[in-house]
Structure formats: C-alpha cells, structure tokens
Amino acid sequence: MWILLNGASVMVKIKHVTSNGVFGDLARCFTRNITLLAELQARRLCKIFFCPTQWVDWHRDQTCAHRGFGQLQRKIGVLYQQEMKSFYTKKFFKAFERGSQRSAEEIVPLVLELLQPRSVIDVGCGVGAWLKAFKQHGVQEVLGVDGSYVDEKMLQISAHEFLPCDLRKPLQLNKKFDLVLSLEVAEHLPPECAETFVASLVGLGPIILFSAAIPFQGGTNHLNAQWPDYWMQKFQSRDYVPIDCLRKRIWQNEKVEWWYAQNLLFYVEQRYLAEHHRLLQEFERTCPSQLSIAHPHLVDPKYMSPGKLLEALPVAMWQGVKRRLAKFSHG
C-alpha cells in the first residue's frame, strides 16, 4: 500500500489483499489508524494506493511495515495539527470570546442552583471563558482541555489549569470531576470519533453539561453536526440520561448566545439521581422525545451569515418545489 501524503510518499507493505479488497494478516495492525487515513483522504490531504505483494520472510517484512506505519503516523500528526491551527486561530477565538463570557455569566448561576461542584473540567475549553465564570463563583479546582492550537497567551485561566491534547483520542486522567463541560465542541470532531469522545466525557465525572451544533447551524469546521437524539443515544448506552432544565430558562435571554439556548442539556449518570432529589425532579420533567428543537434565530436571516444563507437555499427551494407539486396533484 502506497500512501502519498502532501507530496511525500510512504510505502507500507501488506502480505496480501483478498479478492474483495479486505486487508489480510498484517492489516490488523493498522485498524486503529485506518479511520484517520480515510479522514485525511476525504479532505484530499493524502491518497492511498493498494498493491498486493507476497513476502518470503514474513517476520522481517512485518517489522519493516511497522516502521513504515510509525513514520506515517508521525507525518499525519504534524499535518493534522497544522490543519487545526489554520481553523482555530486567534481570530476564531476572539470572535466568540465576548459571547461566551456573557453566556457563562448568565448560565453558571443557574447551574449552581442545581449543583455545588468543587471541581469542573471543560473539554474543548477554548480560552477558558466558562471556567473563569465558575472560578468567579467560588469553584476552586478547574481544568481546561483543548488542542495545542490554543494560544496560551489568550487563556482566561492559569496556564497550569490548561491541558493541551488531541480531542479525537481517548482522554484518561485517572480523576473524577464534579462537573464536566463540553460546549459546542463535539461537532468539530470526525463522526468516527464520536463514541470515543462521549466515552472520554463519561469517564471524567457523573454530571456532564453538554451542547453540540445541530444540522444547518453553521460554523467553522463542523464535521459532525447532529440532532440531540444522536448524542442522547450514545450517552444512554453508557447509562447517562438527559435532563433538559436550562433551555426554558435561557430561551429568550438575549445575553445568552442562541446556540447555547438551543443545545444545552445535562447528561447525568442514572444511579447518581437517587442521591440528588433536585436533579431527579428535573429528570422526571424531561421529555426525551422533544430534545431536538431549533431556536428561531437559526432561521432568522438577521442572524445568518452569507454562507449559511447559501447553505439553506437548496433546502428552501426543494420545499417550495414540493409544495407546488402537492398543489398540482390535488388540483
């Protein structure tokens, strides 16, 4: 298998390829990384060519293949970080900074009416605006996690409270936090990373405050915009249940960015509810079949960028055609 990566080629030999194109033997060594290659190929950052080969000395060639793939992984890692830096620039974080601050100032007190967390982690924290708000309300221990592309000079928390890491990969800290945040982050990760990302969140604590962009919401580098039902199923498979108690309180609050009002939900470990009467009450009031809702600002041209208007145009046109056809068929 030849892989052309930004003009530099790396050869990885595989013992044989079966007639239906499925890897044999050595391919088992590569399965954890093949989705990353597929992602890069989809983004036109690399090309993959397959060539079946027969090897005489299996053990020697297996070692060579491992070495070749290690070289490939290193090149992919460098390329990925370069690409992320091109998306998540100082300008990107500056554009959302004030809106995040205002939203956090309104929402954090509502969260603290329900919970009294002593420790909070924010996975995908950006410059740390939400953690800053929790600290201002007395939370002593905070930790922000995001990519190395975040400029630490822009952080609103201390540098020692920030952990750079690759959010596509499992996050294991061997520590539990009272509250886990992940706000408008999951949609920026490839679909094949969704299970890993949710597993990382539930591994960090029993209560998760979560929001993720829905389809047609628009945004920078959104790779997996999904309705809340999609995420609910992934959390429920790990015995975390949704609690929808904040959106109705911030739905018309102009100080809160509308995407938080639209998407913000708690996911709580089910066995945890028995010890927390207030959360249990809010859980009993939650209707899981009505989580997928859209805020009016989503379709208000006043709040839509030119790119988003163009994205929505084919849908509007198709709806218009269907209405005309329906009138014609009933006419």
Image (cartoon, rainbow, N blue to C red):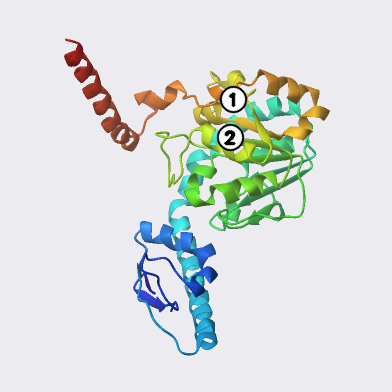
Tell me the tag on residue 266.
Answer: none
Q: What residue does disc 2 label?
A: 232
Do the CB atoms of the residues marked 1 and 2 lie less than 8 Å apart? Answer: yes
Q: Is residue 236 left or right of residue 291?
A: right
- Which part of the image, by quadrant, shows the N terminus? bottom left
Q: What residue does disc 1 label?
A: 288
- In the rendered image of this protein, does residue 24 appear above or below residue 234? below
Q: Is residue 24 left or right of residue 242?
A: left
User: Mark 1 falls on what kind of element?
Assistant: helix
Q: Residue furthest front?
A: 19
- Tell me the residue at 37%/64% (across/down): 20
Q: Nearer the viewer, residue 30 or 24?
A: 24
Q: Is residue 9 left or right of residue 274?
A: left
Q: x, y percentage for residue 311?
A: 31, 36
Q: x, y percentage for residue 91?
A: 46, 47
Q: Earlier in the sequence, mark 1 or mark 2?
A: 2
- Which part of the image, by quadrant, shows the C terminus? top left
Q: Amino acid at mark 1?
A: Pro
Q: Quadrant of residue 179?
A: top right
- Tell me the residue at 54%/63% (across/down): 32
Q: Residue furthest top?
A: 331
Q: Residue furthest right?
A: 275
Q: Nearer the viewer, residue 17 or 323?
A: 17
User: Mark 2 falls on what kind of element?
Assistant: helix
Q: Amino acid at mark 2?
A: Met
Q: Is residue 82 visible?
A: yes
Dot 1 alpha-carbon crowd within 10 angstroms: few under 14, some 14 to 19, many 20 or more: some
